[in-house]
Amino acid sequence: MNKAPALTLALAAPGLAVLALFFLLPLGVVVAEAFRGDALARFLANRELVASLLNSLVLGVEAAAVALVIGIAVALHLARLPPGRRALIQVVIALPLTFSGLIIAYGFILVLGRAGFVTMLLARLGADPATVASFLFSEWGLVLAYTYYLTPRVILMLVPVFANFDERQLQAAESMGASRLRALADVMVPQIAPTVAAAFALVAAVAIGAYGTALALVGTQINILPLRLYSMVADSGADFPLAAAVSVVLLAVCSLLMAAAEIAAASSEARHAQH
Amino acid sequence: MSVAVESLSFAYAPAGAGVSGITLSLEAGEFCAVIGPSGCGKSTLLRLIAGFLTPDSGAIRIGGQDMAHVPARRRDLGVVFQSYALFPHMSAAENVAYPLKLRGAPRAERLRRAGEALERARLSGMADRLPGQLSGGQQQRVALARALVFQPRALLLDEPLSALDAAHRAAMRDEIRAIQREHGIATLHVTHDQEEALSIADRVAVMRDGRLLQVATPRTLYDEPADAFVAGFVGHANLLDGVVRAPGLVETAIGTLACATGDHTAGSTVTVFFRPEAVRPDPEGAVNRFEGRVVRDRFLGSLRRFDLAVAGGCILGETASRRDIAAVGIPPEGIRLLRR
């Protein structure tokens, strides 16, 4: 590499150009726009927008928490399977990651919407289809849909950590006098906590920033930041400085969470690297 | 404290492998090694005694109390695993102090006792290191210190040396024995290495297919194996199928051998057993003399181990002599007959 810096530069140039054109330039424009004038101040003064930010945070935390609980259970199970079967099941589990948010929303509408498959089945048992469907088009419906594609991310992050954990450590702790619960708390939890925290932060960031699924399921019925941003940009005669401020806030929240996730993951990796 | 198992049986659910009818007892302070090929049930036996598995039937007594259905945490046994099972997020000192923490010892006391234990294990400078920063031998010593620091009633070692390289293994072997003597603690040491077992243990138990074949001192096990399997598993051995022809005479594929036939009657089938070191490469005037050709000659420094192809078979011999070998003698007193 070092022998031909010119060649390296030439090879890197297209990538750098794309990065500059489609990332640095728009980001710079948006940030500049957000800090010009009183856009950020107007954001903070707008109760609706601040409420949408809080709603987004709550939604992100809820969806991430549900995904984490399911993900931990599945990952614990997968870690105990023989590697061949584990790999096969992991492929199936990773599949939702390839779907766009709109497709997932459409799938949920087909299952739980007003004329959905499950809705119809429940209607036969006497449930009101409108009630069932209203669940899907509510905040908890969103949590359900988000969980669907956040859980695989959690599982994929946690399985290696669980699979590498030497269960003999728990037996060793028990032989020294620890109860099963005490052994888990003292021995296993501290070792998996950084990765679990990283998984939580990562999926929370994804949930807070997502808008495709939300748009398809709830339209603009629920006051969350990405949908606010969407309607601001979609409207004609939009308040672009305010939209830029919203963008920057959303970006900051998600980046902060991702950074936390990265730091947590790196600290656990550094510890594992010593082995 | 003494450790005893009586008619202990356990089967893994579908396959049926496990252990059956194991009866074995360790005196207080005794060092007993359990050997056998992989899958013989030796680790299962240890896990049953430790309480990681629950027996289907039989008793496990520690200091006279039946512990078969007592959970592992109340058995008060020190266990060292093949992988050491150190807690990677705790320093060496915290690892050793952990059993004391579980017993509610105040922080200052447990750190002091952990420090003393590490000092005895020649690891005083390593107290603050994480296991990942220690060598294999150092991790091993931390694991041993951790298993002993709470003065358990007995010590269980599950292949503790197999993760070490050969150079460290022999030294660690002596160290384990010295520490065990110092603590005067009954110790069960599971290993697949028969040489390790013979060199370290007061008594050695040989297992195969979930059964206990023989428990004896290393010398008895070597000189008077109970059957052909034990003879072949412990050390090197010549094992030949034979038929007793007359008192003092056994017919084998390589010819008729003169040896004590004891109470084996004429016509009974036996396994003829002799150690390679019983084979004499200077057969002048020997009773059982065989001529042949050396087909493999392994130079091992202090001795040579050779295969002598003779009519009808092959004889494994050992000698310190470096001369050519064309014939060997097998003294009758070096031959034992094992029931088949």
Image (cartoon, coloured by chain):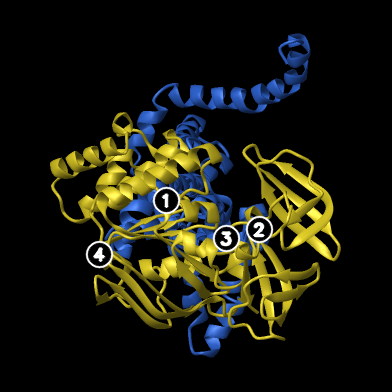
Tag on residue B1?
A: 4
- Considering only order in the chain, which callout, 1 or 4, is on the residue closer to the N terminus? 4
Q: Amino acid at mark 4?
A: Met
Residue B268, horizontal then vertical, whole percent = 69, 85
Q: In the rendered structure, are the residues bearing label 1 and label 3 in contact, judged by CB atoms less than 8 Å apart?
A: no
Residue A150, horizontal then vertical, whole percent = 53, 55
Residue closer to the observer: A256 or B305:
B305
- Quarter holding residue B156: bottom left
Mark 4 chain: B
- In this view, which residue lies farthest toward the bottom? A125
Q: Indicate the chain coloured blue by its letter.
A: A
Residue closer to the observer: B220 or A186:
B220
Q: Amino acid at mark 3?
A: Val
Residue at the (67%, 46%) spot, across then down: B319
Say which residue label 2 marks: A87
Q: In the rendered structure, are the residues bearing label 4 and label 1 in contact, judged by CB atoms less than 8 Å apart?
A: no
Q: Amino acid at mark 1?
A: Ala
Residue A93, horizontal then vertical, whole percent = 62, 60
Q: Secondary structure at mark 1?
A: loop
Q: CA separation, marks 1 and 2?
A: 26 Å
Residue at the (28%, 32%) spot, across then down: B124
Q: Amino acid at mark 2?
A: Ala
Tag on residue B234?
A: 3
- Quarter holding residue A84: bottom right
Q: Secondary structure at mark 3?
A: loop
Q: CA separation, marks 3 and 4?
A: 29 Å
Say which residue label 1 marks: B85
Mark 3 chain: B
Q: Nearer the viewer, mark 1 or mark 2?
A: 1
For residue A208, above or below residue B276: above
Tag on residue A140?
A: none
